[in-house]
Image (cartoon, grey):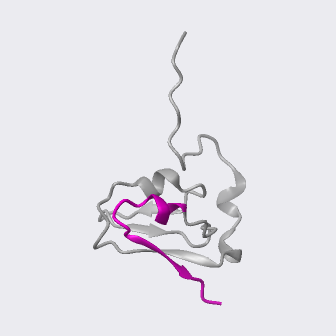
Amino acid sequence: MEKLRPTPGAVVPSGTSDQYIKTGTWRFERPVIDNKKCIRCLLCWIFCPDASIVQNEDGTLDVLLDYCKGCGICAHECPVEAIKMEEEER
């Protein structure tokens, strides 16, 4: 019997309509990444349920705020506390 390997978080193997629906408009807090502290472990990317963490060409990380719901999982999982949750400006 073949052993199944788990799929890492934030990987959607098939197309969905999520990329067309901007869901980040109702959050109360937003993640802010301090790229000077970030060690590029990508745990935030792995655990983000909305696939809203992206890596730029220079290796720095950004958050796609149009899709981030502000759950704070990324900040919780960051081992060097490079992500802080800040109150959303209205």
The magenta region covers: 73-90
Q: Going by the image, does 21 lie left or right of 1?
A: right
Percent coordinates x, y for residue 8 in the rendering: 50, 42
Magenta region includes residue 6: no
Residue shown at 32% from the left, 58% from the top: 40
Quadrant of residue 51 in the image?
bottom right
Residue 38 lies, in percent from the top left, at 32, 66
31 on left or right of 58:
right
Residue ID at (65%, 46%): 15
Location of the N terminus by quadrant is: top right
Q: What residue occupies the far bottom of the structure in this picture?
A: 90
Q: In this view, does 44 lie above or below 33?
A: above
Residue 89 lies in magenta, yes or no? yes
Quick check: 65 above or below 42?
below
Whether 5 is drawn above or below 87: the answer is above
Image: 56 above or below 31: above
Residue 83 point in image, percent of width and height: 43, 70
**Residue 28: percent from the left, percent from the top?**
65, 79
- Quarter of the figure with the C terminus: bottom right
Q: Residue at x 52, y 33 (%)?
A: 6
**Residue ranking furthest to the top:** 1
What residue is rendered at 48% in x and 62% in y?
76
Q: Which one is nearer the viewer's eye here, 58 or 9? A: 9
